[in-house]
Amino acid sequence: MDKVNREKQFRAYELLRKLDMQTTATMNQVAYGHISGAEWDYVCGQHRKAFEDWMAFAATIDKPD
């Protein structure tokens, strides 16, 4: 595996880990009934950003033939 592929693989790992962490934070808010207010808005915004970052990266991945 060349350096470019390793870097892309690591970037994918980082972005997926961040998305997973943000999903967990969001679900914790739901589990505890904290689904309104400034904290909810912040958590949802962070989750949305993590998802958008992942989707932007995923769009750069070459599709198999």
Image (spheres, rainbow, N blue to C red):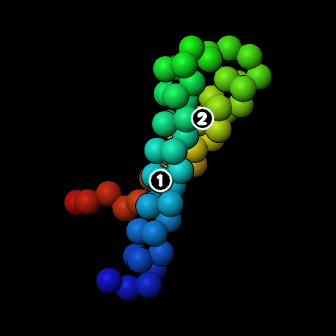
Q: Give the residue pinned by disc 2.
A: 48
The mark lying in front, picked from 2 and 1, is: 1
Q: Tag 1's secondary structure?
A: helix
Can residue 52 be seen here? The reply is no
User: Residue 37: in sight, yes or no?
Assistant: yes
Residue 37: x percent and y percent? 74, 16
- Residue 63's quadrant in the figure? bottom left
Q: Quadrant of the C terminus?
A: bottom left
Q: Residues within 10 Å of mark 2 (few under 14, many from 20)?
A: some
Residue that badge 1 annotates: 17
Q: Is 38 on the left-hand or right-hand side of 48? A: right
Q: Name which residue lies at 65% across and 32% down.
A: 43
Q: Position of residue 6 (x, y in %)?
A: 41, 77
Residue nearest the observer in this picture, 56 or 6:
6
Q: Is residue 21 above or below residue 57?
A: above
Number of labels in the image equals: 2
Which amino acid, mark 2?
A: Arg
